[in-house]
Amino acid sequence: MKRISILAAVIAAAIPFSAIAHKQWLVPSSTVLAGKDVWITVDAAISNALYYPDHNPMRLDNVVITAPDGSTHKPQNPATGKYRSVFDVQLAQQGTYRIANVNAGVSARWDTPESLAAAKAAKDAPAPAAGGMGGAPRGGMLRNASAEDLATRIPKDAVNVTVTEGIGRVETFATNGSPSEIKATGKGLELVPVTHPNDLFAGEAATFRFMVDGQPAAGLEIEIIRGGTRYRNAQEEIKATTDPKGEFSVTWTEAGMYWLETATTDSKTSVPQAKQRRLSYVGTFEVLPQ
Amino acid sequence: MRVSVSIALGTLLVAPAAQAADLTVNVEIPRINAAEYHRPYVAIWIEDAGQKSVADLAVWYQQTEGKEGHGTKWLPDLRQWWRKSGRNLKVPVDGITAPTRPVGKHALKLDQKHPSLAKLPAGKYTLVVEAAREVGGRELLKIPFEWKGKSPSTGKAQGKDELGLVTLSAKP
């Protein structure tokens, strides 16, 4: 019995990481613009390769566009296909637009007496197929749930219930005219520019700061990958770690569209059932040639 | 060879009107055989030792009225000029912005009374010429020079793609 719950814990721990293997992204058609009637189109997907939609479209329900004056707008002309979603953004004001998909919710996993029995049977059977996800099925799970769902949708006989709160932000930036200040929202894990995200050039260093709930996030591990992974054999990840001020610096070796991800966990949950809060951030940044 | 000629020319010019520093820039826009050719956008400016833009000399862009404005949509394609000056500028600017130029050699002669040069202290600078062409490439050339130095300052740079020969002559 004890061994089964350890196994269950291992599987539970593995799931978030396998979820990370698929990369979420928002890719704008342009990031530096000027003129009277300025529009961009944005691709939104969850894929393996950057930036090729080959897995799932991103749902656009939670996409919010923040204009330079702080007003928020919904995507225009949204459409969701098999592999990607697209939408337009009109940059009517001068300054920087922040385009973000922010997901906040609770997830839960649990066992039931039936699933535990099945897990025991599976353990006695030959080893499951390779791939990590082939382990014994759990009793059930909830994703993107609310606190009320926890009370109503988890079976009464559930055991080993793990509830996790999550806040994830996927975003990108585009500027019409001169870049304007990007203000922190003070909620969850977010990037606060030191170097403006629409002022990045190959051969130059950029500095960014990460905050959790408005406080500097030290020791965060940052992963950066340049797009076009389909056309090279190595991912060529750039790794960085934030310093006590929550800052890190990266020197862009080449021009391109870059994907940046970081995640952390803490225990500052707002739902009492949740012991842990997962925070994640993904940004897309265009680096221009000198 | 070219340098000595320019110096001789500079000396000649100094004689009649002393105390009138000026700057002559020649920019060649090369003939490019392309299925779809558009005249390049060109920005010419001066940077200080810290690579900060201190004077815009010329910006050539499409100024015909269109839905998207005076062709300003493509000004950010002059990437370095755009970040260093363009995005903070309200175009058109008198004496600086002008329509795009055709293939050929174009001379830009500015005296010290030009608004861009009037406030420029004597010292060492870099002339930067950047060109970007719609459905084409982009090129940036730099020529270091001395403004209001003891002797005339000349220099040149040869472009490879979007720019031809660029020459500079600064007369103290």
Image (cartoon, coloured by chain):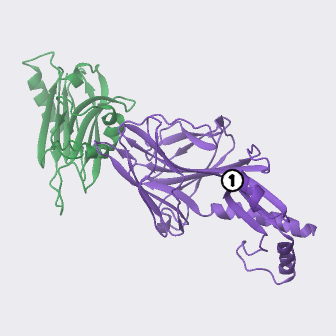
Chain colours: A purple, B green
Q: Is residue B7 above or below residue A97?
A: above
Identity of the residue furthest to the top in this view? B19
Which of the 4 image quadrants contains residue B81?
A: top left
**Quick check: A67 left or right of B17?**
right
Q: Residue A261 at what x, y percent from top left?
A: 59, 52
Which of the 4 image quadrants contains residue B149?
A: top left
Q: Could you classify mark 1 by the number of other residues whose Cα lies within 10 Å: few (under 14), some (14-19), or many (20 or more)?
A: some
**In this view of the protein, can residue B37 be seen by the observer?**
yes
Which of the 4 image quadrants contains residue B32?
A: bottom left
Circle 1 chain: A
| Residue under the point 77% across and 73% down | A137
Identity of the residue furthest to the right in this view? A1
| Residue under the point 15% across and 30% down | B7
**Quick check: A63 left or right of B160?**
right
Q: Nearer the viewer, residue B127 or B95?
A: B95
Secondary structure found at label 1: loop
Q: Which residue is mark 1?
A: A146
| Residue under the point 12% across and 30% down | B8
Q: Residue A225 at what x, y percent from top left?
A: 54, 56
Q: Is residue A177 above or below residue A152?
A: above
- Name which residue type carries label 1: Ser
Q: Residue B30 at what x, y percent from top left?
A: 16, 51
**Quick check: B52 left or right of B160?**
right
Identity of the residue furthest to the front in this view? A152
In which quadrant is the N terminus of chain B drawn? top left
Q: Residue A210 at what x, y percent from top left?
A: 61, 41
